[in-house]
Amino acid sequence: MILEKFNPVIPSEDDGFAIEAITSWSLSRNQLIRHYLHVFTGTMQRKFNYLVYLDLYAGSGLKRLENCEIKSGSPVIALSEPRHFSKYIFCEKNKDYSDALKVRVNKYCRQENILVFNGDPNHLIERLAYYIPDSTKKNKVATICLIDPFSLDIDFETVRLLSELGVNFLVVLALPWKSKDRFRFCIDEERELLNAFLGKPWSSFKNGLPVNNNEIFFRNLVRYFHQNLTGLGYMAKGSFHKMEDTNYDIPFFFCGYYSNTAGTRKIHSEVLKSVTPQVKLFE
């Protein structure tokens, strides 16, 4: 699958509003997200009347690299997909970023059905449930929810509640740590956050392998999260992908697609034809 040249609907330029800083690893993440959304829309438009894109960590729409180059964020990637979604819902906790995103989509994307919420996505479920249409025989709805947290910011209870709305998930997980024993701080000082991310105590997960470095911790974390999501009844495919930035102790990030409809394997395999994973994690 070869994608056409990316033509962002919002220019990648400094317009005076807030832009979050990122490192270069996010570029490969963005390319992967773009591939998934392109295949998702192509597959689902033939089967569903109404497509919804939900982004829980939308940011400002633009990203600034360390060299000051400005790139598109996930909202712009979704809005630039040629096969348009029927509705776009963006959530962003940082008010400066959500305000900047509102300005940008109001200027360049007035013709689209867009909602921008400022707030922690863990506290926005009731509002999101109101705006995601119910799927019926006459109006079949397919929603894809991008979960791309900065760390362990998403509570699994939030994921579970969203699953009750029938959404499909595209999950991108990365821990851009430079400290070689950062996992110890996560397990000890951030244990409450870790437990909320997994939906149950970290101590309840046993696989017989000692956790003694960041990479083993991350692999286990991904496996437990994946098991929890498939436990909700989702068909799933996932893989690790190489970090472009070599300054981090964990050299890869995870991307998983979780679907409640047929086509999970096809969507995943179509994406991986063009994006080669470093390690296939789940079959």
Image (spheres, grey):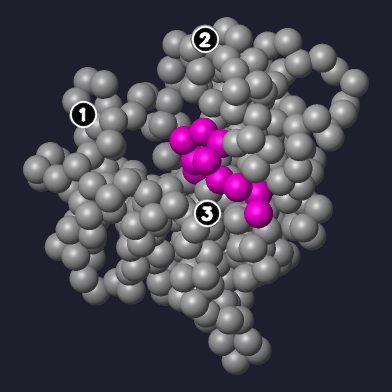
Q: Which amino acid does label 2 sit on?
A: Ser
In the picture, the disc for residue 204 is none
Q: Look at 52% across and 41% down and name the residue there.
A: 153
Q: Position of residue 59 (x, y in %)?
A: 34, 46
| Residue where numbered disc 1 is placed | 69
Which of the two discs, 3 and 2, labels the residue nearer the N terminus?
3
Against 208, residue 255 (above or below) is below
Label 1 – label 3 distance at C-alpha? 31 Å
As drawn, the residue found furthest toward the top would be 180
Residue 140 among those drawn in magenta: no
In the picture, the disc for residue 122 is 3
Against 7, residue 41 (above or below) is below
Asked whether disc 3 touches disc 2, contact meaning CB atoms under 8 Å apart, the reply is no
Image side of residue 23 versus residue 101, left or right = right
Q: Where is residue 124 in the image (x, y as percent from the top left)?
A: 47, 62
| Residue where numbered disc 2 is placed | 179
Q: What residue type is labelled 3?
A: Asn
Camera-side mark, 3 or 2: 3
In the image, which residues are magenta?
148-157
